[in-house]
Image: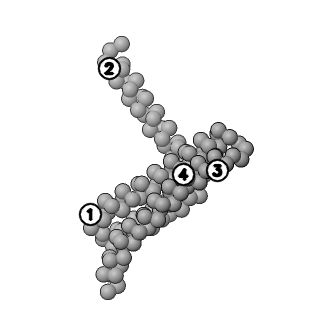
């Protein structure tokens, strides 16, 4: 087997991994209400950032916070589905794992809102003032 054949297989494996990731993303967007809420807030935030002509650094921070929020929500969903796979009946430790995973999203969300306020409020005050 030549180098070309190995590269070809490696490229196909890479494409498959992107396909699997896309399927996962589509599942979360379609089936998870919290992800849908995060996406609506994302669109509103990006439109506001564009209209307010935020500086580049604020855009970078905003995009990092958004990416972190969406990624954490996806991980929360993965943990919840894994727990559901392990046990269908109620178990206090399964509940605890799900609650802790949701708490991670909640904490990040609180700080994302605070960061959003720090970024947007001065621009809004400047606009109306």
Q: Whole-percent x and y of residue 103?
A: 53, 57
Q: Earlier in the sequence, mark 3 or mark 4?
A: 3
Q: Is residue 72 left or right of residue 97?
A: left
Q: Which residue is mark 2?
A: 4
Q: Image quadrant for the N terminus?
A: top left
Q: CA distance from mark 3 to mark 4?
A: 10 Å
Q: Which residue is mark 3?
A: 95
Residue at 40% over, 23% down: 9
- In the rendered image, the quadrant that contains the C terminus is bottom left
Q: Earlier in the sequence, mark 2 or mark 4?
A: 2
Q: Which residue is mark 1?
A: 56
Indicate which disc, 1 or 2, sits on the residue closer to the N terminus: 2
Element type where label 1 sits in the image? helix
Count residues near mark 4 (Cα–Cα under 10 Å), then give few for <14, some for 14-19, many for 20+. Answer: some
Helix, strand or loop at disc 4?
Answer: helix
Instruction: Identify the residue at the far right of this view.
Output: 89
State the residue position of label 4. Answer: 101
Determine the CA span between mark 1 and mark 3. 42 Å
The mark lying in front, picked from 2 and 4, is 4
Determine which quarter of the picture holds residue 67: bottom left
> Disc 1 and disc 2: Cα gap in Å?
42 Å
Contact (Cβ within 8 Å) of mark 2 with mark 3: no
x, y percent for residue 123: 32, 76
**Splitting the image into 4 quarters, where does residue 12 fall?**
top left
Question: Which residue is painted at 73% across and 44% down in the image?
Answer: 89
Does residue 27 appear in the picture of this structure? no
Q: Position of residue 43 (x, y in %)?
A: 45, 63
Q: Earlier in the sequence, mark 4 or mark 1?
A: 1
Q: Marks 2 and 4, how far apart in space?
A: 44 Å
- Residue 115 visible from this viewpoint: yes
- Nearest to viewer (mark 2 / mark 3): 3
């Amino acid at each position: 087997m030549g180098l070309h054949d190995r590269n070809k297989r490696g490229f196909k494996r890479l494409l498959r991994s992107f396909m699997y990731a896309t399927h996962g993303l589509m599942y979360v967007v379609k089936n998870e209400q919290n992800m849908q809420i995060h996406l609506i807030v994302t669109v509103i935030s990006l439109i506001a950032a564009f209209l307010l002509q935020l500086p580049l650094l604020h855009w970078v921070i905003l995009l990092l916070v958004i990416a972190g929020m969406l990624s954490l929500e996806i991980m929360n969903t993965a943990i919840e589905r894994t727990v559901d796979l392990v046990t269908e009946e109620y178990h206090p430790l399964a509940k605890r794992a799900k609650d802790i995973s949701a708490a991670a999203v909640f904490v990040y969300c609180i700080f994302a809102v605070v960061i959003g306020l720090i970024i947007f409020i001065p621009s809004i005050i400047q606009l109306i003032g």
